[in-house]
Each structure stands twice: as C-alpha cells, then as structure tokens.
Amino acid sequence: MPVTCTLNSEAINALDLSAIQALIEQLLKESDITCSEQQLQFQIDYELEPGDPRELPEIPEIRLWFIRLDSRYPWIPFLLDWKSGELVRYAAMLVPHQFSTQDGIQFNPEALEIFVMHKVFVLTDWLRSRGLESRSRLKAMAQMFGYDLEDDLFDLLSRS
C-alpha cells in the first residue's frame, strides 16, 4: 500500500526533511523492509505564480530539497513507487534534462548514466548490508532508464 509524503512550500523553502524523516523511520522499523519496497510517493504542493509554465523539476527550490534528500538517503529509490512514476520524477529532480511536448522528458545522457551507476553502487551496498538480493532489483531500476546491466558488473561488485 503506497505511503505518501506531502511537501508544501514552507518545508521545501526551508529544506526541511522532517516529514520524510518520520516516514522513513516508520518504514525502516518494519521487520521486513521489503514490505516498504516501491511504496513511497510524494505529493508536492508548491505555490507558483499564476501562469508559471514550469514543471516541478524545473523549480530550483524543489530540486534543492530533493538534492538534500538524496544526500541524506541516497538509497531512497528502493522506497519510491516506480509504477506511479516516482523514480523517474526523482531522477528529474537530480539529473539535468529538457522537457519536450512531443517526447516528454529528455535526460542529459551522460548525467543520467552517472546517476544510474551511482544509484547501482549505493543500492548494492545498502541492500547487501540488509541481506537482500540486489541484482534483479537493480537491473529493473536501470531498465527504467533504458540501461541493461550485465551480470559481470554485479560479479565485480560482489568481490569488493
């Protein structure tokens, strides 16, 4: 069952992570963390001037809040609800991109590759520390962004 973190303008402008901290602490208390896998959604209520055409990931204050979140919880993609688009929206907060009316979001390819690989490395270690299998999860995450990861990469990581 999805869990929603509601963010308002005040929390975003103050870089206040308290709402998400409380949710994450609650989710991590679960005896089985996999029950919280892909359950987290964000409801962002950020006040814009009338007629402001920007998408949420184009607003610097919102992006900064997500950068702070990512620095505190770099493994948060494990919790995000991928099916509802939270993983891609999360990436849009952190990775340079363009919006196209015809093609949708277009990530900077090099920046996206760095983001995906960083998350693979972080999540590999985080999942391993919890005794959880990571290979299939991380392959699925990478595929969300158009990357196919080879087993050789995971074999290499398992040796380190």
Image (spheres, helix red, strand yellow):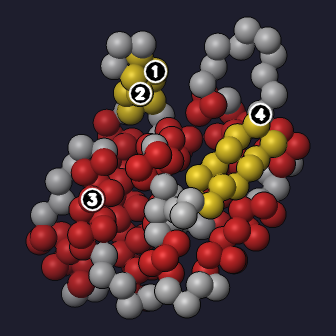
Please report whichever mark, 1 or 2, sits nearer to the chain's N-terminal start: 1
> Is label 3 in contact with label 4 (beta carbons under 8 Å)?
no
Please report whichever mark, 4 or 1, sits nearer to the chain's N-terminal start: 4
Residue, far front: 1
Residue under pointer 4: 46
Name the amino acid type tagged 2.
Ile
Neighbourhood count class around disc 4 (C-alpha, 10 Å): few under 14, some 14–19, many 20 upward: some
Q: Distance between the residues labelled 2 and 3?
A: 20 Å
Please report whichever mark, 3 or 4, sits nearer to the chain's N-terminal start: 4
Secondary structure of the residue carrying tag 3 is helix
- Residue 154: percent from left, percent from top: 20, 74
> Is label 2 in contact with label 3 (beta carbons under 8 Å)?
no
Q: Which mark is residue 105?
A: 2
Name the amino acid type tagged 3.
Ala
Q: How far apart are marks 1 and 2 (CA)?
A: 5 Å
Secondary structure of the residue carrying tag 2 is strand
Please report whichever mark, 2 or 3, sits nearer to the chain's N-terminal start: 2
Q: Is residue 68 above or below residue 75?
A: above
- Residue 136: percent from left, percent from top: 24, 69
Mark 3 or 1: in front is 3
Secondary structure of the residue carrying tag 1 is strand
Residue under pointer 1: 99
Residue under pointer 3: 140
> Is label 1 in contact with label 2 (beta carbons under 8 Å)?
yes
